[in-house]
Image: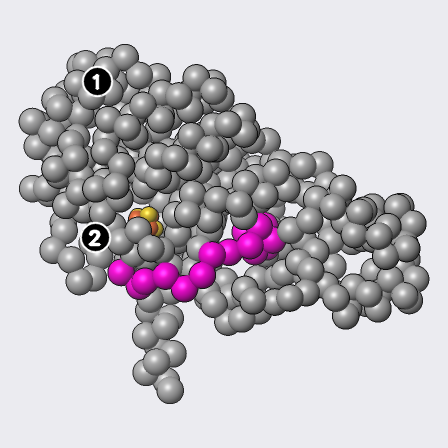
């Protein structure tokens, strides 16, 4: 967002403290402002224990990110809720809240659209608009918590966008969301999903933040992978798997490989054998996803028989694999579809 004002909710307490002391306010004011932000204040007017000059400073030189619920779909079958959130500039992203036995989990977006162009993805088809700030990622979690009156304990960065293509903001988000002054969600309860930007995986590993890494593999070799994922042309699988091994060594977190099963493209027994061979000896888990139908593509879901055969072959070679349980199947249009429909609807309206 091109806003020259200071994005208050993207600051750590130390940064906020420095900002305020530089302007002549006492250090303890930073803690007060942080407390108000944590309570959900959206303007300086609500911060009743601040002096007028500090409120003026915040009003004139800072802004507080919020996300507004534009649309909300609730599954009839389970408690899954899909949101379309908008930000101050009118851009929209999607987020999904799922209820598991262990608590509530949210899948948030990190960019408006995506540059990566995976052919099976509705977000990739809508092009790229901009990256989100750390505070806009936090705002999605806060808005969902407020709306549902629940505490969200798990976060997945798997919505719209490629998190590692928005590296600095995502790392800042991770640092903030795990801190006591913010949402205090443990790093082990956070999963970052990437299509495989190898140098950024290496850079992330160097931060030693013990978050889970999920890598979209979707094929057992570069030839099939590059048919659906343009990123594969830049970063061959061999390099990608090397980066995943190094990530595991640096963080101690097992890597999950996402594999969307597309009928006739990557779901043959031969593909399963080849994949098992490539992943041999790696501390990893394969998450098989029966692909959603995406408007404008010819991709269809693998049959249940194919899915079972794929799992069996991997398991037989010591690779842990599961077929992802589909929550909210009635509202589970693939990621990016809700925003696409919203944009089309607005265009028709104009
Ligand atoms: S699958 Fe992920 S990385 Fe690929 S286009 Fe969609 S949002 Fe981007």
- Give me the residue at 80% from left, 47% from top: 18
For disc 1, does the CB lie below 8 Å from ligand 1?
A: no
Q: Is residue 240 above or below residue 273?
A: below
Asked whether residue 76 is in view, the answer is no
Residue 108 location, x and y as percent? 47, 49
Could you classify mark 2 by the number of other residues whose Cα lies within 10 Å: few (under 14), some (14-19), or many (20 or more)?
some
Q: Earlier in the sequence, mark 1 or mark 2?
A: 2
Q: Which dot marks residue 315?
A: 1
Task: Give whichever of 34, 305 is nearer the camera.
Answer: 34
In the image, taking residue 100 as reference, residue 14 lies left or right, namely right
Residue 254: give its label: none
* Applied colour scheme: one colour
Residue at 50 percent across and 40 percent down: it is 155
**Label 1 element class:** helix
Q: Which residues are magenta?
A: 125-140
Q: Label 1 neighbourhood size at 10 Å, few (<14), some (14-19), many (20+)?
A: some
In the image, residue 189 sits, relative to residue 230, either above or below, namely above
Is residue 328 part of the magenta span, yes or no? no
């Amino acid at each position: 967002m091109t806003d020259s004002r200071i994005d208050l909710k993207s600051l750590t307490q130390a940064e906020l403290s420095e900002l305020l002391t530089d302007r002549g306010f006492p250090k303890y004011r930073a803690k007060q402002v942080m407390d108000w932000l944590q309570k959900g204040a959206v303007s300086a007017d609500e911060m009743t224990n601040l002096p007028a000059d500090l409120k003026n400073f915040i009003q004139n030189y800072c802004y507080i990110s919020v996300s507004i619920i534009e649309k909300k779909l609730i599954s009839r079958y389970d408690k899954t809720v899909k949101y379309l959130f908008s930000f101050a500039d009118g851009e929209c992203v999607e987020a999904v809240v799922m209820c598991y036995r262990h608590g509530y989990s949210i899948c948030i977006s990190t960019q408006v659209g995506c540059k990566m162009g995976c052919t099976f993805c509705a977000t990739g088809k809508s092009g790229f608009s901009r990256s989100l700030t750390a505070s806009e990622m936090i705002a999605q979690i806060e808005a969902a918590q407020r709306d549902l009156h629940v505490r969200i304990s798990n976060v997945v960065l798997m919505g719209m966008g490629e998190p590692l293509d928005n590296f600095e903001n995502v790392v800042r988000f991770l640092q903030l969301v795990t801190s006591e002054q913010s949402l205090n969600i443990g790093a082990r309860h956070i999963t970052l999903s990437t299509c495989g930007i190898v140098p950024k995986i290496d850079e992330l590993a160097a931060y030693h933040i013990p978050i889970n890494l999920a890598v979209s593999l979707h094929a057992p070799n570069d030839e099939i992978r590059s048919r659906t994922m343009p990123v594969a042309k830049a970063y061959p699988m061999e390099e990608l798997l090397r980066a995943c091994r190094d990530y595991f060594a640096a963080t101690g977190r097992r890597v999950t490989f996402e594999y969307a099963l597309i009928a006739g493209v990557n779901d043959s027994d031969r593909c399963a054998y080849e994949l098992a061979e490539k992943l041999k000896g790696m501390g990893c888990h394969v998450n098989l996803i029966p692909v959603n139908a995406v408007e404008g593509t010819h991709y269809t879901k693998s049959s249940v028989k194919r899915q079972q055969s794929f799992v069996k072959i991997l398991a037989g070679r010591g690779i842990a694999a599961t077929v992802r349980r589909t929550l909210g199947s009635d509202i589970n249009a693939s990621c990016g579809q809700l925003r696409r429909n919203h944009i089309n609807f607005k265009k028709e309206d104009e």
